[in-house]
Amino acid sequence: MESGNIIRKASESDTMAILEIYNQGIEDRIATLEEETKDYSYMKEWFERHQGRYNILVAEQDGIIAGWASLNPYSNRCAYDGVADLSIYISRNHRGKGLGKQLLAEIESLASANGFHKIVLFTFPFNRLGQGLYRKMGYREVGVFRNQGKLDGEFVDVMAMEKLLLSNTY
């Protein structure tokens, strides 16, 4: 880990920083189909749902929250109990500097410790920086959902990626 970087479980006091970084991702149109920024009450409720197996990690750099990652439910069906959906967001000023890799490595360890055998994620096909990170960390492209959602009134494709945590054989 780079000097000055700390990866740790998020605490409730991190909620505002997590919200700011998430809203940057919404505004920049690179990581989510959400179009409207969120407020503190939304993020506080989201934080409360991410206790137990579905944790949040933050990347702290020189005392500032620079990014976060969360394990999210993939499906409510019990057949998918071992699959976690991943969210990862890095603040604008810290993108491309290795924090994503550190967060991803730690959230994978946490996922394994919490009984998940697989992580899935969904990204935009044009998000090359994110895909490069995921591929370096052993994720594979599953496929592209055409016209999966709308962003600013236009249909966009969404790429699905996955990583098996217990056995990375393909």
Image (spheres, rainbow, N blue to C red):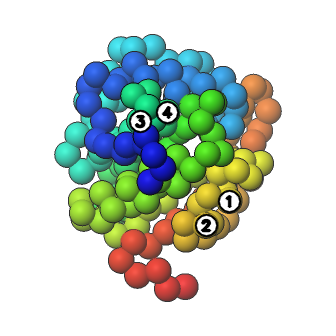
Q: In this view, does 147 lie to the left or right of 86?
A: right
Residue 60: image tag: 3
Find out whether the residues at labels 4 and 3 contact each other: C-beta distance under 8 Å: yes
The type of residue carrying mark 3 is Glu
Q: Which residue is drawn at 70% across and 31% down?
A: 29
The type of residue carrying mark 1 is Gly
Residue 27: x percent and y percent? 66, 23
The residue pinned by badge 2 equals 136
Q: Distance between the residues labelled 2 and 4?
A: 21 Å
The residue pinned by badge 4 equals 66
Q: Which residue is drawn at 49% across and 85% down?
A: 169
Q: Earlier in the sequence, mark 2 or mark 3?
A: 3
Mark 2 surroundings within 10 Å by alpha-carbon count, few (fewer than 14), some (14 through 19), many (20 or more): few
The type of residue carrying mark 2 is Lys
Dot 4: element? strand
Task: Choose top left, top right, bottom left or bottom right for residue 90.
Answer: top right
Residue 64: x percent and y percent? 44, 27
Dot 2: element? helix
Q: Earlier in the sequence, mark 1 or mark 4?
A: 4
The residue pinned by badge 1 equals 132
Q: Distance between the residues labelled 4 and 3?
A: 6 Å
Image quadrant occupied by the N terminus: bottom left
